[in-house]
Amino acid sequence: MSGEFITFLQLGFEHVTDLAGYDHMLFVIGLCAALPPKQWRRVLILVTAFTIGHCITLLMAGRYGGLLSSDLVEQLVAFSILLAGAGNLYYLLSDRKRNFPLYYTLTLFFGLVHGLAFSNFFRALGATDAELWSQLLAFNLGVELGQLSTVAWFFLLLLLLRSLFANLIDPGRLQYWWSVVVSGIVLLVGLYLLVGRL
């Protein structure tokens, strides 16, 4: 791999895992908060749909320039976090079955939105088409790896809690309350961010 490819791979990974820009990581956690580890295939589809949306937006921004104002993008990112938490709580508290095709589609759409938050960087590069494709491939591969590592840590923490409290609480109830609490936190942080960006 070339040095440039490694650089953009690292940038994509850090774009997700950088705690200073935690909104992306928070949305990813919101995506999987209501799903148990045994549904990892659905989690993988969600994460990849988000990355695909992210990639499409970065490609369009890199070639055609700014698509939306940065203020509006920040508000939409905050709204996506709020909606991820609220959607989880709706399904958890109403005991309804999740419509996964719709969920995948919404995740793809919010991937488009989150991609806008990083589009200025690619516009500023002024890369040729060939360079842009290579940079986007590396960056979005890094994004995917960053998201998957976030999900892995999230599920590892859940499994640790299950083992610690195995004799005190039924694993199904622990999973339920874990999902409710995490989704509630995601919703509240999303609301806080949205109000602060209005």
Image (cartoon, rainbow, N blue to C red):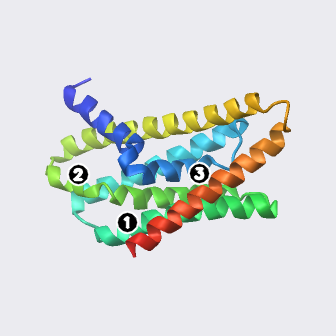
For marks 1 and 3, give the CA distance: 19 Å
Q: Which residue is mark 2?
A: 122
Please rate how many residues cluster around mark 3, counting C-alpha atoms within 10 Å: few if below 14, some from 14 to 19, many from 20. Answer: many
Q: Give the mark nearer the N terminus: 2 vs 3.
A: 3
Coordinates of residue 59 in the picture (x, y in percent): 30, 53
Give SS at disc 3.
helix
Q: Which mark is residue 175?
A: none
For marks 2 and 3, give the CA distance: 26 Å
Question: Please, is residue 163 above or below residue 70 in the view?
Answer: above
Q: Give the mark nearer the N terminus: 1 vs 3.
A: 3
Q: Give the mark nearer the N terminus: 1 vs 2.
A: 1
Residue drawn 72% across and 35% down? Answer: 38
Coordinates of residue 176 in the picture (x, y in percent): 77, 48
Residue drawn 72% across and 64% down? Answer: 90
Give SS at disc 1.
helix
Please state which of residues 196 and 111 is positioned toward the viewer in this rendering: 196
What amino acid type is highlighted by mark number 3? Leu
Question: Please, is residue 13 above or below residue 86 in the view?
Answer: above
Camera-side mark, 1 or 2: 1
**Placement of the N terminus among the 4 image quadrants:** top left
Q: Which residue is mark 3?
A: 31
Q: Which residue is mark 1?
A: 74
